[in-house]
Image: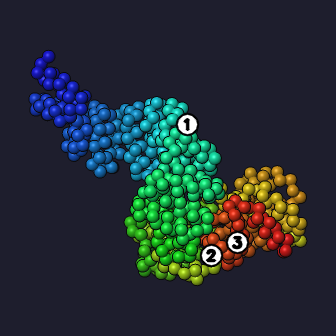
Amino acid sequence: MDENQMTMQKALELHQSNSLSEAEQAYRALLAAEPGNSQVRFLLGTCLLQLSRFDESISVLEPLTEHPSAGPDIFNNLGIAYRASGNLEGAISAFQQAIKANPDYSQAYFNLGELLETGNALKEAAQCYRKTLELTPTDRQAGAAFARVLTRMKNWADAENIYRQLLSGDSENEEYQVQLAFVLASSRRLEEALEIYQELLSRKPDFPEILSSVCYLHERLGNFPEARRYALKALEQKPDHAEGWNNLGSVALAEHQPAEALQHFQKAIELSPGLILAHFNIATTQLLLEEYESGWTGYEYRLSLMPTRFPRYAESNWRGEPVPGKSLLIIADQGCGDTLQFVRFLKTAQNVSAANVTLLCQEELVTLLAPTFKDVCTVVSTIENSTPFDLQIPLCSLPQVLQVHQSDQIGDGGYIQIPETASVEVTTLARELDQGMKKIGIAWQGNPSQDRDQLRSCPLDKLRPLFELPGIQWVNLQVNEQSRTDLESLQTSARFLHAGPLVNDFRDTVWLMDQLDLVLTVDTAVAHLAGAVGHPVWTMLCHTPDWRWLLSGEKSPWYSHMRLFRQPAWNDWMSVITEVKAELAAL
């Protein structure tokens, strides 16, 4: 064995024993003797990477990538160095080159997935983690990362499956159990989540984070005394636990104690200024109290809670200043109900900005909104091959920049026009309306993917007493086919027309509403739609509703034609139904 071979063997031994500084010196001595030795250069670059001397590692590894035979390890390590030095585009390219060099190189897929996840490219990150697991099914780190991204994407079923697979090989792993419980809670299987947390507490009774999670579940189940007890126990164990104070604030708000809730949310922020959810909770509580100036400012935190990055079509945001002749894109940033609620500010935004305004909104709203706002803006559902806009703003940020600080600045309903025509299917259905009966449209279920849908939607069987009333023709406005089967399964003598599955978009729904005497709905897009066109509408609300409905009163500051029916206690739909039935009978 010659001297260089001996030095190489010694360098490898030093490297493997983590004596990195000594290994570096040995590799440099070898390179001085053999400057063209690519293996030694790769090992030196790797050693420098492990020493966190990233720029030096890059300078050593980069020349190796120019060789046609450069292997995936070179690109992978270079990608790690790029990422650590802040060159994220270079890192992505390097990991992609590693995969190109060896399509079965699992580590590069994982590293690329981590990078994409950090950049909120969740769909692409999930694909990388999925490929990693295909190549290395026993890689628990990749499994946990895949489940984490699926959770962020709200793909609850697949996330649950991955966590259960991980737990099958490590049944008492606390991290996996906590995450599985979160997934179950998020998919509204609250009791199952509670069982997991209670099992964890049986092993670690003073686990403040789990105590806080149990508080959250009891609050969602309406068990407020238990929720408060667990929240206080968590804070007793860990007084500086910001999430615990945030949860206690949520309990207070659920108990209709907004002033107390604000104190707890503020305490959470004092302990953890970066706790975005607490900032957002303060904002929505302020909006609930009609403290609009401060509420709209904090409402901007909603954008930081989005699972994916807010789209950008312009370099600058519009902040409410005049921009004559500029192109301004207003982007619907929440659900269809929010879009219907906030488009009332489009005309003011156009007047103030003097810009050429485009509204980017949900496809099913375009045919309804375009005619109404034809003199204000262009309404589209996609942006393709367009020249860049000068400015942009989320739709629900308009009240902040337009300084809507008082209820009388909100305006009334009736700001969306009722269309003159509808689809053939809907106009044909309308001929079946019985002019000798009260014609009432009904919607009892919101979008199941909405976080609060379990609270705001009313179980259909609880509406049965309403269907006992004579002289009413009910029009089913739910858009899903299952709703017809569900109504028929009630086996009542009520007369139903099933409109929902026939409607193509919101234009059809509004046209049909105009043929009805009343709309009865829970807090969903149908309520906003009826309110926005000024149609008579009764909205049934859960005990602690969304901020826009306030905590008391029969009227909404957003829709004067709307009447509100409120649960007097948590999940007490029967009291609401009894009141609605009495009012319908009085008609």
Element type at mark 3: strand
Question: In the picture, residue 111 is in which quadrant?
Answer: top left
Tell me if mark 1 has few (under 14), some (14-19) or many (20+) residues whose alpha carbon lies within 10 angstroms of its own.
some
C-beta proximity under 8 Å, tags 3 and 2: no
Which residue does the numbered mark 2 point to in the structure image?
Answer: 558
Q: Is residue 113 visible?
A: yes
In this view, the residue farthest toward the bottom is 408
Q: Look at label 1 and name its amino acid.
A: Arg
Q: Residues within 10 Å of mark 3 (few under 14, many from 20)?
A: many
Left or right: where 254 falls relative to 119 = right
Q: Where is residue 26, by image quadrant?
A: top left
Q: Are marks 2 and 1 in contact (CB under 8 Å)?
A: no
> In this rendering, is residue 5 above or below 45?
above
Return the disc, 2 or 1, that comes first in the chain's sequence. 1
Most foreground residue, 503 or 568: 568
C-alpha separation, residue under disc 2 versus residue under disc 1 = 45 Å
Kindly identify the residue that appears in the image at 35 percent across and 45 percent down: 92
Whole-number angstrom distance, CA of label 3 to CA of label 2: 12 Å
**Residue labelled with disc 1:** 164
Above or below — where is 365 with respect to 562? above
**Nearest the eye: 396 or 218:** 218
Q: Which mark is drawn over residue 213? A: none
Left or right? Give the position of 509 relative to 136: right
Residue with the most extreme top position: 1
Amino acid of disc 2: Trp
Disc 2 vs disc 1: which is toward the camera? 1
Asked which secondary structure carries label 1, the reply is: helix
Viewer-nearest of discs 3 and 2: 3
Q: Label 3, on which residue?
A: 564
Q: Quadrant of residue 56?
A: top left
Residue type at mark 3 is: Leu
Question: Is 90 left or right of 518, judged from the image as shown?
Answer: left
